Image: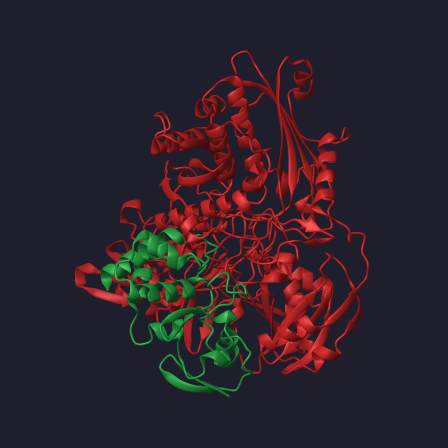
Amino acid sequence: MIRFNLNGRDLALDVDGQTPLLWALRDTAGLTGTKYGCGQAACGACSVHVNDEPVRSCALPVSEVAGQRVLTIEGLGATQLHVVQRAWAELDVAQCGYCQSGQIMVAAALLATTRNPSDAEIEAAMSGVLCRCGTYARIRAAIKRAAELA
Amino acid sequence: MPAFLRSRLSRRSFMAGSATVLTVAIRLPALAQNTPPPAPNRHPAAFIRIAPDGKVTFLLPTVEMGQGTQTGQAQVLAEELGVDIRSVAIAVPTQPQPEYRIHLFNQMRSVGSYGMRYWHDPLRRAGAQARMMLVQAAADRLGVEPASLTVSDGMVIHAATNRRVPYGQLTEAAARLTPLAEPVFIPANQRRYSGQRIARLDTMEKITGRATFGIDVTMEDLLHGAVKLGPVYRAEVDAIDDAKARAMPGVIAVVPAPRGAVVVARSWWQAKQAADALEIRWKPTPHDTLSSALIDAQLRAGLDRADVPPSLVRGDAGGALQNAARIVEADYAVPFLAHVCMEPITCTARTTAGRIELWMPTQGHDEVRMTLERALRIPAEQLFINSTFLGGGFGRKTDGESAIQAILASRAVGGRPVKVIWSREDDVQQGHYRQTMMARLRAVLDTEGRISAMSIRVAGPQMGRNLGIPVTNNIDPFSLLGLVDMRYQIPNLRIDHAVVDLPVPMRPWRSIAHSFTGFFLESFMDECARAAGRDPLDFRKAHLAGQPRMLAVLDRVAQMSGWSTPAPAGVSRGIAVVDSYGSPVAEVVELRMVNGQPRVERVHAAIDCGRAINPGQVETQIQGSVIEALGAALRLQITLKDGRAEQSNFGDYPILRIDEVPEISVSIIETGSPLGGVGEPGVPPLAPAMVNAIQAANGKRVRALPVLEKLG
């Protein structure tokens, strides 16, 4: 049993500790908003927050989040849309949408520490999250819009 | 048959509980004349349903993979029907009936930038017909003239008496009426959806993690499958040692499948660990030593072959080239490309007696059906394909291989549902690539600096035959579109295709043949312009008499980029124009050479797609196309060694990141041309515009992709 706090609720998952957090979330906890893209922390589609820090869940054994706080896309806007999600909706960022959970989680972590990120700060934070549809221009604009809305 | 739907079908009533549902069949263009109507005991293939609660369901065979088509289709329908777009639900049919098939393929297939241009007119007509039937039903009920009624947000309104009747109360009466053959459309100046920047209907699901992609499908008793497939294409299994895998935690079954095996386990991670632990010996194949060097040599030999039948002959290009004093000649090459959709290949299957149910992010419903009929002898009527969102498609997700794997896996565990997911490495290494191609272009310039004759030899596989599409007159559209239908006016022209069969599984990539024919022809036009001492824009225009749409996008992009004024210091520009999928697109690339490598700073794009149903989506499709094409042209390729792919994941197949993309400005031209496609036409001009800009910068002509490798 691995115990941790997921989206504000304590839970215990009956899963091997070496299982990457990604697959524990998807196949055991049943939260599929976090996506598999590469399995080697190279694309960012699996990004979640652990204790408010963005991490790649595909390369993190679930045993390492024991006793920690994990936030996924399902928990980010659970009560009301997060400011990043509001900006994403306003700018209609998503195309296929598959990478967008990861994009939004990393953007939310950026804005939590950097209130008005510059282009360089946006690039530094977001360059680890790949978008195959090429929604980058709208991602950049939406992060700036979220900073205004915050 | 008039431009009209068959009344026998359109008057059908569907009983939903005790209430009648109005359905209106959509007449399919091109096919309706020679396709028999659906059997009476079957639902009309494509239709709109209006339920008594006013909910509109629209059944149409285009899946949503990011291209925005479903929002665009809902815009057109909601406009003509007079309903709130948010009341429209879109469902993709579960069986690929003939009525859903698009031409060229004669398959239900979400490809070819057809989503809007193919379905717009029939959808608009059906929406208008349904509205007029509802209005007539309201007129009968209220005892007034239809002309005195208006519609708004799913209500018929009699303004004079302030009476309103919701559509849901009119469906039963409307369903007894005959649709008008020529319905009256909503006037252009009253449109509220079609042509507007409407927000995508799927945005909220996609930003909250609620959207269900194929990989997200979940259901009771679901098991998970991972694959281990032969590293050499088409290698069959000789022997499997699965003792170690079977002993691993969570493993339920090891299931032989074509080219390898599927491991079924309680979670995908367990299945993947066990698949990696499988020991499989594969039978030798003739391709075990295949390499990119060998393939390149075969393609180069194809360029020199003397026995290739013509695909297109106009005038006497051969004679003109033989007698010419001066010939411009160049060879070009493009590599294999992988699609790397962010969502990897996946399929969920549940098998019970007489019923195979799939949940799948597929662009190719009929290809999946045909593959299963052939490989597993599954009758079409027993197959149900539930379409999910696709996490990208780009032409990759049309095949049925993962469906075979999921079905075999499900059968092996007593019919329980099994979700098979390929790893990223499987996705990158297991083929289905955009084909590698070479071309040799030769031209004669006349004394006025115009091309009087051109010959084009293409060497490479026939993608069309690879897909089971018959090739007639030596024209494989999947190899030659963009050349045999080129817009340039050249009096003497010969095009042929030296076919080189390759054992690598191949599948079209965004913009299909145009992804390389655009590079060949538009690079060569620039080389000819240089040889003629002409400006590349003027040179192209001189060969485009009678092509107003091509000229319009060129003029627009020239204006956007300030083509006629010098570029800023250190910046060079390149231009290209390609007409594909009904939409000419011209692009100008602005770049700087930094340490001998191009840094693209800005791309200007002008598209004439006839009319933009959703300008915001057109803009974002063109931006995405430019980014995709730029990443590929700069640094992406699949190379082979010892019969297997040398690349495996994003580390060695590095698509562009946010800090690597240029500013991209998009301009949409609307001149009343027929509706064109949008998802693909932005791709082809980018690579040639970039290499043209590189030559403008440093005089070096890059004739093979990817650019960074070839620049050295």
Q: Is residue A117 above or below residue B482?
A: below
The image shows residue B297 at horizontal and vertical percentages of 73, 38
B518 relative to B192 in the view: left or right: right
Quadrant for the C terminus of chain B, please: top right
In the rendered image of the structure, the colour used to display chain A is: green
> In the rendered image of this protein, does residue B185 appear above or below residue B258?
above
At 56% across and 14% down in the image, what residue appears?
B446
| B510 lies above or below B93 | above
Looking at the picture, the colour scheme in use is: by chain
User: Looking at the image, which is closer to me, B313 or B46?
Assistant: B313
Which residue is depicted at the point 50% across and 29% down?
A: B695
The count of marks equals 0
For the residue pair B537 and A39, the one nearer the viewer reads as A39
Quadrant in the rendering for residue B410: bottom right
> Which color is chain B depicted in?
red
Residue appearing at x 51%, y 40% in the figure: B684
Q: Report if residue B387 is visible in the image.
A: yes
Q: Between B712 and A47, which is closer to the camera in this rendering?
A: B712
Q: Is residue B351 visible?
A: no
Q: Position of residue B335 (x, y in %)?
A: 62, 44
Quarter of the image for residue B153 reads: bottom left
Residue A1 image point, x, y percent: 51, 88
In screen coordinates, is A147 left or right of A101?
left
Residue B481 placed where, x, y %?
Answer: 59, 38
